[in-house]
Image: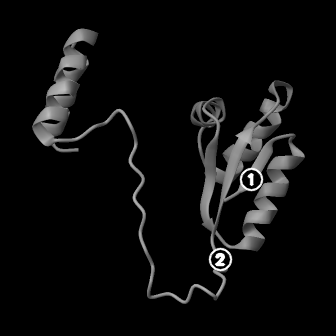
Amino acid sequence: MSVKTLEILEQLKSLTLNETTQLVKQIETTFNVDISKPKLVRIDKRDEDETQPQIQTEFDVLLVSVPADKKIALLKVIRTVTGLGLKEAKDFVDSLPQVVQAGLNQEAAEILKQQLEETGAVVSLT
């Protein structure tokens, strides 16, 4: 981050809740945006042949949940797969759902999914 961005971030940290609310309203007005609702953008792909099915070649392994009694076993797998430290892996598991790895081929995604499910985790491929 640039120095200017860091300075702005530090200033934002010092705002009260009321000041933050007023700032958000002012940003919405100034830049003509509404951040209260996420906007979905639809892209039409009319050039593609709609009769031809799309085959997914890349998969993301999404860790959905894990039973509390299986957390330690899962932490070991997460640390091995991601290379995270113990604290980072714990924070990762505590903030589920999370993508463990993205852009894997089907075989690698299935293997990772199986490893995670062996620890008792609920995993899906997206």
Residue 57 in sight? yes
Can I make out residue 16 in this image?
Answer: no
Residue 35 drawn at (x, y percent): 31, 36
Q: Which residue is mark 1?
A: 124
Q: Amino acid at mark 2?
A: Thr
Bin the neighbour count of mark 1 within 10 Å (Cα to Cα): few under 14, some 14-19, many 20 and up: some
SS type, badge 2:
loop
The relative height of residue 1 versus residue 22 in the rendered view (above or below) is below
Q: Please report the residue visible at 65 percent of the width from the left and 77 percent of the height from the top.
A: 57
Q: Are marks 2 and 1 in contact (CB under 8 Å)?
A: no
Q: Position of residue 123 (x, y in %)?
A: 77, 49
- Along the viewing direction, whichever of 106 and 73 lies nearer the viewer: 106
Q: Looking at the image, which residue is at 66% across and 83% down?
A: 53
Looking at the image, residue 5 sits to the left or right of residue 118; the answer is left
Image quarter (top left, top right, bottom left or bottom right) of the C terminus: bottom right
State how far apart marks 2 and 1 are (Cα). Answer: 15 Å
The N terminus: image quadrant:
top left
Image coordinates of residue 120 in percent, x first then y, are: 87, 40
36 relative position to 13: left or right: right
Residue at the image position 23 percent from the left and 10 percent from the top: 18
Quadrant of res 121: top right
Residue type at mark 1: give it: Ser
Q: Nearer the viewer, residue 26 or 46?
A: 46
> On the rendered structure, is 92 left or right of 76?
left
In the rendered view, tell whether residue 80 sits above or below residue 104: above
Residue 69, given in percent of the width and then of the height, sits at 85, 25
Residue 47 to residue 69: above or below: below
Q: Which residue is mark 2?
A: 57
User: Of 3 and 27, which appears nearest the observer?
Assistant: 27
Q: Few, some or many C-alpha atoms within 10 Å of disc 2 (few <14, some 14-19, many ≥20)?
A: few
- SS for tag 1? strand
Q: Earlier in the sequence, mark 2 or mark 1?
A: 2
